Image (cartoon, helix red, strand yellow):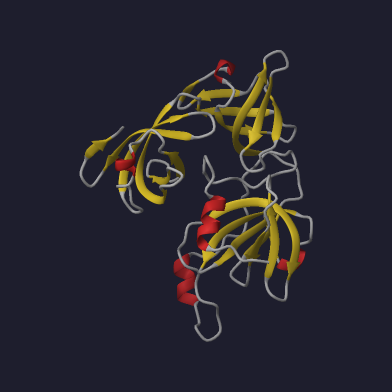
């Protein structure tokens, strides 16, 4: 099994609309996980580190949440083959004593992992290896929150269909008389449920919606401000670590002049105005923070 290089791993987890995902429950939509036991802080781990007996502390690299299925495990070599949801790709993931394992929020050991289980990983690059900092196994069906894209809304049945961001599968969620709808930070209504809109949802065990927040509709204009963390000139694509929400966004630069795009470098501070097109963000204007000058087509 070929270990993913740093570039391959970066390309794999850098999705069109990258955000942190959620652990998944059996209702089929992603849901947050809140383990009772918390890993030690980085400071505590450094303080307790014994160079003769312990593995070195993990580097402070970006952590990406991934959900999928265990293909097989090798406890002797401390690694497993993992297939992410919605793909045919298989990734070799490493773990060791620094990895934290949970089942339904309770600490467990790696011996609880079995082939075919649906699991969720906090992954990062440790040199040239994909390493799992935390592994969650969920066996119970409960409520949760998730993120996805609207595929349709049936006003007669009050049924909202959302494509889950993590699994890329459609999930039907039931509106009720108590469901609260927001359009961004403002009050909203089911009229905001347009196809292609991004939403956050809070749902119950029976897929009953407690709240829906419409984050972006196709045609909406957004401004991203932060550090450029990835540049692919051939694909006319950059990734921005957005300061306002702490998330990473892929932005397509097709409308930006090639002479301007070639000035973009990893680590540069930029302000980008982009239109949400339903399946991606497309830049219309880019401003470089270092010179505070606007560059556009």
Q: How many marks?
A: 0
Question: Where does residue 153 sit, x and y in percent of width and height?
Answer: 66, 20
Question: Where does residue 246 sit, x and y in percent of width and height?
Answer: 43, 46
Q: Tell whether 276 sits left or right of 153.
A: left
Q: Tell whether 112 sits left or right of 54.
A: right
Q: Residue at x 56, y 23 (%)?
A: 181
Q: Residue at x 35, y 45 (%)?
A: 226
Q: Is residue 98 above or below residue 267?
A: below
Question: Where does residue 67 sit, x and y in percent of width and height?
Answer: 65, 50
The N terminus is located in which quarter? bottom right
Q: Is residue 181 above or below residue 83?
A: above
Q: Nearer the viewer, residue 1 or 75?
A: 1
Q: Is residue 119 visible?
A: no
Q: Quadrant of residue 107?
A: bottom right
Q: Residue furthest right?
A: 115
Q: Residue furthest top?
A: 156
Question: Where does residue 156 sit, x and y in percent of width and height?
Answer: 71, 13
Q: Is residue 238 above or below residue 37?
A: above
Q: Nearer the viewer, residue 168 or 56?
A: 168
Q: Is residue 77 visible?
A: yes
Q: Quadrant of residue 86?
A: top right
Q: Residue at x 52, y 43 (%)?
A: 18
The C terminus is located in which quarter? top left
Q: Nearer the viewer, residue 39 or 20?
A: 20
Q: Is residue 130 above or below residue 16?
A: below
Q: Residue furthest bottom?
A: 52
């Amino acid at each position: 099994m070929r270990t993913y290089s740093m570039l391959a791993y970066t390309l794999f987890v850098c999705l069109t609309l990258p955000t942190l995902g959620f652990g998944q429950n059996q209702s089929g939509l992603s849901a947050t996980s809140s383990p009772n036991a918390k890993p030690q802080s980085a400071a505590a781990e450094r303080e307790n580190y014994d160079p003769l007996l312990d593995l070195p502390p993990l580097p402070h690299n970006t952590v990406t949440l991934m959900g999928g299925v265990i293909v097989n495990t090798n406890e002797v070599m401390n690694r497993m083959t993992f297939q992410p949801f919605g793909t045919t790709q298989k990734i070799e993931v490493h773990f060791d004593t620094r990895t934290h394992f949970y089942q339904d929020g309770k600490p467990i050991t790696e011996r609880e992992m079995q082939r075919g289980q649906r699991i969720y990983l906090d992954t990062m690059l440790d040199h040239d290896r994909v390493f799992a900092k935390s592994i969650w196994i969920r066996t119970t069906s409960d409520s949760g929150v998730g993120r996805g894209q609207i595929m349709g809304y049936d006003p007669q049945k009050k049924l909202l269909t959302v494509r889950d961001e993590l699994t890329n599968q459609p999930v039907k969620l039931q509106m009720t008389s108590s469901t609260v709808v927001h359009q961004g930070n403002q009050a909203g209504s089911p009229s905001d449920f347009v196809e292609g809109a991004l939403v956050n949802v809070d749902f119950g065990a029976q897929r009953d919606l407690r709240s829906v927040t419409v984050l972006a509709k196709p045609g909406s204009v957004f401004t991203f401000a932060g550090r450029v963390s990835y540049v692919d000139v051939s694909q006319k694509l950059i990734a921005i670590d957005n300061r306002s929400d702490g998330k990473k966004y892929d932005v397509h630069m097709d409308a930006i002049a090639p002479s301007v795009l070639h000035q973009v470098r990893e680590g540069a501070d930029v302000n980008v105005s982009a239109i949400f097109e339903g399946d991606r963000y497309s830049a219309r204007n880019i401003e470089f923070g270092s010179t505070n000058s606007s560059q556009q087509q």
